[in-house]
Image (cartoon, rainbow, N blue to C red):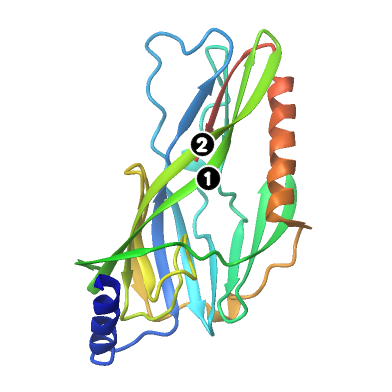
């Protein structure tokens, strides 16, 4: 009954407010850093992993959206070799693009991994969201809160004395999202196509966040095009290739301790 009441209220509010159908939103993304050590473990007194902030933009219009970086994030680069520890990061690349067509339910990602370009095709996911009825003002927009629990798996790779092992671990995430019904476009930095309004903030387990810092009615709408550059793969095929390359990277670093940091 709460969800029905919420939606009824939504239809009463949005006609009063000016509805924005196209534009640009800029976000700061702070990923969770996961450290996996091999060898003799972390050295005594080693500082915690640095805080990385990635700025990205979402362009939306014509029932489509495009996500990409807006600045060079080389300031976030980590040292390559400190005290015998090799540090590698795997995250969003400078040229990575995510495009969604809401009308067709299609999603295409242009991703770079280990100097190779991929074109990942998938359908837009549909989460099991609970509308809580809570409201909050963000950047001048009255936002509604929605929550979900994401249940999945993640690969854990470890190496000790030259022997590598990999196993699947359960991974459950609590996701809290704030979206703006006054912008009735299901765009956002993540979980796009799943909620009836522009997503302005996402909190995943309290440590991975997306926060909108700017929303504008003006944007380079002409740039919202399906990416075409890279090897065409499915999401499942890309995951398998990425895991294979990560294992090869780990093997190549078998003579030293490896710190693997990822979001």
Q: Is residue 17 visible?
A: no
The answer to the question of whether label 1 and label 2 lie on touching residues, with beta carbons closer than 8 A, is yes
* SS category of the residue bearing label 2: strand
State the mark number for residue 170. Answer: 2
Q: Left or right: where does residue 253 sit relative to residue 24?
A: right
Q: Is residue 164 visible?
A: yes
Horizontal and vertical percent for residue 56?
47, 59
Q: Left or right: where does residue 38 sit relative to residue 128?
A: right
User: What residue is drawn where x is 68% and y is 32%?
Assistant: 246
Number of residues whose C-alpha sits closer than 10 Å to that of mark 1, classed few (under 14), some (14–19) or many (20 or more): few
Horizontal and vertical percent for residue 232?
78, 59
Q: Earlier in the sequence, mark 1 or mark 2?
A: 1
Split into 4 quadrants, where in the image is the N terminus? bottom left
Q: Is residue 149 above or below residue 51?
A: below
Horizontal and vertical percent for residue 78?
51, 31
User: What residue is drawn where x is 44% and y is 66%?
Assistant: 188
* SS category of the residue bearing label 1: strand
Furthest-right residue in this view: 231
**Quadrant of res 113:** top right
Residue beneath disc 1: 152
């Amino acid at each position: 009954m709460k969800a029905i009441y919420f939606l009824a209220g939504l239809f009463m509010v949005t006609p009063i407010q000016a509805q924005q159908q196209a534009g640009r939103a800029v976000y700061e993304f702070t990923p969770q850093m996961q450290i996996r050590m091999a060898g003799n473990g972390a050295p005594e007194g080693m500082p915690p992993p640095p805080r990385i902030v990635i700025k990205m933009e979402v362009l939306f219009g014509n029932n489509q959206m495009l996500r990409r970086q807006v600045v060079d994030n080389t300031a976030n680069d980590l040292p390559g070799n400190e005290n015998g520890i090799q540090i590698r990061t795997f995250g969003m690349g400078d040229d990575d693009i995510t495009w969604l067509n809401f009308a067709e339910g299609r999603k295409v990602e242009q991703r770079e991994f280990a100097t190779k370009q991929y074109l990942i095709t998938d359908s837009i996911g549909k989460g099991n969201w609970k509308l809580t009825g809570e409201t909050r003002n963000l950047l001048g927009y009255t936002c509604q809160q929605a929550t979900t629990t994401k249940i999945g798996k993640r690969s854990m790779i470890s190496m000790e004395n030259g022997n590598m092992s990999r196993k699947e671990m359960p991974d459950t995430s609590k996701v809290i999202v704030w979206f703006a019904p006054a912008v009735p476009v299901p765009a956002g930095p993540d979980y796009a196509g799943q909620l009836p309004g522009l997503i302005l903030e996402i909190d995943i387990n309290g440590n991975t966040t997306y926060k909108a810092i700017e929303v504008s009615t003006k944007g380079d709408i002409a740039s919202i095009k399906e990416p075409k550059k890279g090897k065409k793969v499915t999401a499942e095929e890309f995951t398998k290739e990425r895991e294979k390359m990560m294992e090869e990277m780990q093997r190549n670093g078998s003579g030293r301790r490896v710190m693997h940091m990822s979001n």
